[in-house]
Amino acid sequence: MNIVSWLTRRAEQSPNAPALFVGRACVSDYAEFDRRARVIAGWMISVGTKSGDRVAIFMENAPEYLYVQYAAWYAGTVIVPINAKLHPKEAAWIIENSEAALTFTNASKDDLLIGAGVVGQVVDVGDKRGNLFDDAKPVTTHVHRKPTDLAWLFYTSGTTGQPKGVMITHRMLVSMSLNYISDVDVVSDADSALYAAPLSHGAGLYNMVHVLKGAQHIFPAVPGFDPADVLELTEYFGAVHMFAAPTMVKRLTRQAIEAAQIGKGLRTIVYAGGPMYQADIIEAVDHFGDIFVQIYGQGECPMGITALSRFDVSDRTHPNWQARLGSVGRVQSSVEVQIKGADGLCDRDQVGEIIVRGDTVMPGYWRNEAASAQTIIDGWLMTGDMGSIDADGYVTLVDRSKDVIISGGSNIYPREVEEVLLTHETISEVSVVGRAHPEWGDEVVAFVVPIAGSSIDMEALDTHCLSQIARFKRPKEYIVLSELPKNNYGKVLKTELRKLL
């Protein structure tokens, strides 16, 4: 199955339904959305693009992004979405590694890519779409693809080295999309998806289910993530769904509180992509209400491992509500999850590595057999995440296995320490890492960002930690930063923090 058939069907069923918006302005209905995708696909085939070729997309969020994405699938090719915030040299590495036949850009990135040594044709859709595509002959149907054929090459963020290309098949995208409906949220043609996060990542992975259901797709006219603009658009459109990283949720909550707005029109925010600290999500729910759903996934199992329902995120009546809120929810429908210890599978509530198998799990990494063999074992994805499953089926993510600090033979999970520090009134952000120690093996170091106007009292932080966690988990040093280093998806780069040590 070629997932582009979802657009074909939607254009047949409701051709005049509004599809793509920039700000409040509708720029195409579903018939026009489909027509433009078919025209670009025809142009791609006319210049020699073949089924199975890779097509890179290095673009800011815009309607043209979706035109190109679906055009690539109409032509039977594999999309390679690249975060538009990457340096051209970083993008060039991904384009070369994927052996992309074409690279689509906007915002005049073509000259930058060519300067970075990109091989292959670079097409600026912003400047050239009028005279480059309009004379092309649109395709009449899509190229047949098997469920196991590649649809998307997702390059990992590369925080520990060069990124790897996760091979995502058409079956994986279908499985992930249907899991959204069964485990995350319902979608109808009365809803709108707002793209405030990069389409190269989680926000883009959820566009397909919204096409399937005929929802509207909103691209903010204000570049980047502007919380005030998002709140204005959600109030205007109503019934808005959006994907957001935890840092985006925190900024949106601050904006709404300061502007005395209640988030009218926001129906669902799905959050993932980094740790959501309890203090932040409690504040967000207290202000916005039960609009939040958490999912846990990886590029290797996109958006598809577990989900924490809006009820569980907002419930404060269950005796274990805090533990459940600190979890990442229950296993999604199309996968199995186990916890693996050194001597086999773990019992309930025991911490080990989270492993996953099912239709949403990747077949492997692009042309990297060694990494694939280490990550997929007997059909199970070794996530590298440490966690546990309780008697009610809630999965709690403790930390990345590589981030666990072992001090004096005891495991210390940085997130536990971070959660405690974030409840202190002077702390805005925190990240905890281990530092080599000649006697204990590792010791705990906390990088802290103070709230504006606050000063850091080290003794007060010590006292705060000792009131809630064991002494051996207490940071041995607090290092104050004006901001934490993050990658383009908002994840804290602990590798950079370790370099500072």
Image (cartoon, helix red, strand yellow):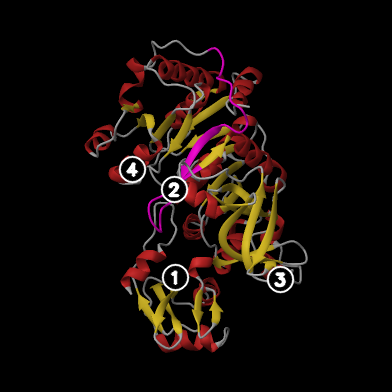
| Depth check, front residue: 141 or 32 | 141
**Dot 4: element:** helix
Q: CA distance from mark 3 to mark 2?
A: 32 Å
Q: Are marks 4 and 2 in contact (CB under 8 Å)?
A: no
- Considering only order in the chain, which callout, 2 or 1, is on the residue closer to the N terminus? 2
Q: Amino acid at mark 2?
A: Lys
Q: Amino acid at mark 1?
A: Ser
Query: Which residue is labeled 2 in the image?
Result: 164
| Mark closer to the observer (1, 2) | 2
Query: Which residue is labeled 1 in the image?
Result: 431
Query: Which residue is labeled 4 in the image?
Result: 93
Q: Are marks 3 and 2 in contact (CB under 8 Å)?
A: no
**Dot 3: element:** loop
| Residue 146 is inside the magenta segment | yes
Q: CA distance from mark 4 to mark 1?
A: 29 Å
At horizontal 44% and vertical 73% (from top left) the residue drawn is 433
| Mark closer to the observer (1, 3) | 3
Q: Is residue 26 visible?
A: no
| Depth check, front residue: 487 or 300 | 300
Q: Are marks 4 and 1 in contact (CB under 8 Å)?
A: no
Compared across the picture, whether 494 is left or right of 110 comes to: right
Q: How crowded is the residue under tag 4: few (<14 C-alpha within 10 Å), some, or many (20+)?
A: some
Look at the image and give the residue range highlighted in magenta. 140-166
Q: Amino acid at mark 4?
A: Trp
Indicate the position of residue 369 as horizontal and vertical percent values.
49, 46
- Considering only order in the chain, which callout, 1 or 4, is on the residue closer to the N terminus? 4
Q: How crowded is the residue under tag 3: few (<14 C-alpha within 10 Å), some, or many (20+)?
A: some
